[in-house]
Image (cartoon, rainbow, N blue to C red):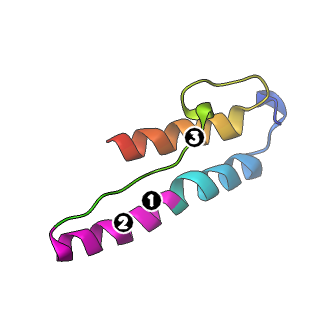
Amino acid sequence: MDIFDETTTENMETMFKMNVFSSFEITKQVVQQMKKQGSGDIVSMGSIAAHQPYEKGSAYCGAKHAQRAMVES
């Protein structure tokens, strides 16, 4: 739980590293393999926080929104 004005930059960075950057790196590797094979599917598991932010979830909800946008694009 984190209140926006009480969370730290370190906490926000950790959330984005765990949820956005790690998803990016793994998906990038999968896409490269899919290109070699000529096909494939990617299934991404997220969180309701990507769709419905909640009180005291600023870092987590922000990271999940970013993760969802990255995957959907």
x and y, in percent, of residue 65 in the image: 53, 35
Q: Amino acid at mark 1?
A: Phe
Q: What range is drawn magenta here?
A: 23-38
User: Do residues under tags 2 and 1 come within 8 Å of each other at their CB atoms?
Assistant: yes
User: Separation of disc 2 and disc 3 at Cα?
Assistant: 18 Å
Quadrant of the image for the N terminus?
top right
Residue at disc 3, secondary structure: helix
The residue where tag 1 is placed is 24
Residue at the image point whose x is 35% and y is 69% from the top: 30
Q: Earlier in the sequence, mark 1 or mark 3?
A: 1
Query: For the residues marked 1 and 3, what is the alpha-carbon distance in whole angstroms?
Result: 13 Å
Q: Which residue is mark 2?
A: 28
Using the image, determine if residue 44 lies above or below residue 56. Answer: below
Is residue 25 found inside the magenta-colored segment of the image? yes
Along the viewing direction, whichever of 54 and 15 lies nearer the viewer: 54
**Placement of 54 over or under 28, stated as above or below:** above
Asked which secondary structure carries label 2, the reply is helix
Residue type pointed to by label 2? Lys
Q: Please report the residue visible at 66 percent of the width from the left and 52 percent of the height from the top.
A: 13
Q: Which residue is mark 3?
A: 64
Query: Residue shown at 75%/52% (left/top)?
Result: 10
- Mark 1 surroundings within 10 Å by alpha-carbon count, few (fewer than 14), some (14 through 19), many (20 or more): some
10 Å crowding of disc 2: few (<14), some (14-19), many (20+)? few
Among the 4 quarters of the image, the one containing residue 41: bottom left
Depth check, front residue: 58 or 50: 50
Q: Nearer the viewer, residue 11 or 23?
A: 23
Q: Is residue 19 magenta?
A: no
Residue 32 appears left or right of 43: left
Three-letter code, disc 3: Lys
**Where is 64 relative to 55, above or below?**
below
